[in-house]
Image (cartoon, rainbow, N blue to C red):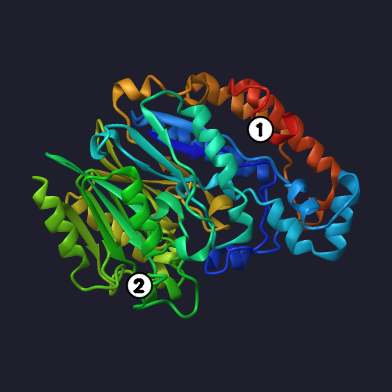
Amino acid sequence: MNFDGLVGPTHNYAGLSHGNVASRTHGGQPSRPREAALQGLSKMAHVRDLGLPQGILPPHARPRLDVLRALGFLGDDAEVLRAVADAAPHLLAAVSSASPMWTANAATVSASADTLDGRVHFTPANLASTFHRSLEPEHTGRALRRIFPGEVFVHHDPLPGMGAFGDEGAANHTRFVARRGGLELHVFGRSAFGGGPAPTRYPARQTREASEALVRRHGVRSAVLIQQATAAIDAGVFHNDVISVGSGDHFLVHERAFEAEDALARVRQAFDALGGELQVFVVRDRDLSVAEAVTTYLFNSQLLSTPGGWVLVAPMECAEDPRARAVTEAMVAEGFVARVETLDLRQSMHNGGGPACLRLRVPLTDAERAEVHEGCVFTPEREAALRAWVTEHYREELRPADLADPALTDEVRTALDELTQLLSLGSDFYPFQR
């Protein structure tokens, strides 16, 4: 089941993410929060209408005035906002970020079929590599516990919030499914303690130590750990879901995705051992370079097994770019997917988030799905209510200077308070409600 992040009312372009080329490129430009949220809802509806169950993860409350007060900005809300806007506008941008919308970074999830205790395991990502995202794990954990209650779900705390255990969640994690069970692929960027290759231009956000800890604490039966190519990270591939995407027995991957030459062979071997035969489509550098992969976000697509066959849901940039379009046409011609469908997610894409960034995959049995909080299941009726809610509460445009407007903070709280009623999340879901 896919759980998409609902874009928050403070969606803006602040260029906060070092190593994320799109984020830096569009930093300081006006954003369109209403359009962004409606584009996200349209994507959820598109996947649901393909015949797949779809869920919602609500936005976090922003700005985080509690963080600003902890950093020494005192006074009432308006005074705090004015002071930080004058003295440290970069901090105001950070605590106002709507980055929780990219729920591929919310957590790592292990299926009950793959774990030793037969339960679904969640670990919220600590997102320790960037300040603005390191503010997310506490509320992410609260949301996951509220949406996935009951004994069938195990909720862990985030890993220690330090660089040595930097964890970016499901953006570096893929689950394949063979006849005799699932295989988890964990991709890391560097080893914190063991040495070895590391990027030099941009940071490696996921460490081997974090990936190993996730496998241990979830009790995963079958897992493969692979290092991402350091050259790819330095080219702007800040998460593995910018250079590969896998699901079921399908794997779409760039030939320069991994550091070791035998990486793909190791994945195949582990999958074969579980009685499967991995269907791999390797994109050659001569057909689409790593830089072009970053620009078009081809690999940040959703690879979906639907009642009508395998579908790749890609950003519209893949239709507009001739070389990316040629690759998608080859996928169809060779039978890797039945069709490729493209969506307009431009508002998210300008911040470096495509279709795959916006969703957290939660593998569930029918019985486990029945335990999910019903208010966060994306039904047509809930879609209509959310579209009306977004239209009423979200600003059409947001500029960097608008983040200091106390009225924006009030608007966000009013909107989110109403959202908790729409999604039946309770009157204590957000800190400002408690």
The quarter of the picture where the N terminus appears is top left
350 or 127: nearer the viewer: 127
Mark 1 lies on a secondary structure that is: helix
Question: Residue at position x 72%, y 31% from top?
Answer: 415
Of labels 1 and 2, earlier in sequence is 2
Numbered circle sitting on residue 390: 1
Q: Amino acid at mark 2?
A: Ser
Numbered circle sitting on residue 289: 2
How far across and how far down the image is residue 311, in percent?
29, 42
Q: Pointer 1: residues within 10 angstroms few (<14), some, or many (20+)?
A: many
Check the image and report above or below for 264 versus 136. below
How far across and how far down the image is residue 308, in percent?
24, 33
Q: Pointer 2: residues within 10 angstroms few (<14), some, or many (20+)?
A: some
The quarter of the picture where the C terminus appears is top right
CA–CA distance between discs 1 and 2?
Answer: 38 Å
Question: Residue at position x 85%, y 52% from top?
Answer: 81
Q: Are marks 1 and 2 in contact (CB under 8 Å)?
A: no
Numbered circle sitting on residue 149: none
User: Image check: 432 left or right of 5?
Assistant: right
Check the image and report above or below for 366 versus 276. above
How far across and how far down the image is residue 156, in percent?
45, 41
Residue 392 can be seen in this image: no
323 or 268: nearer the viewer: 268
User: Image check: 82 left or right of 377?
Assistant: right
Residue 129 can be seen in this image: yes
Q: Amino acid at mark 1?
A: Val
Determine the image quadrant of residue 230: bottom left
Check the image and report above or below for 306 versus 166. above
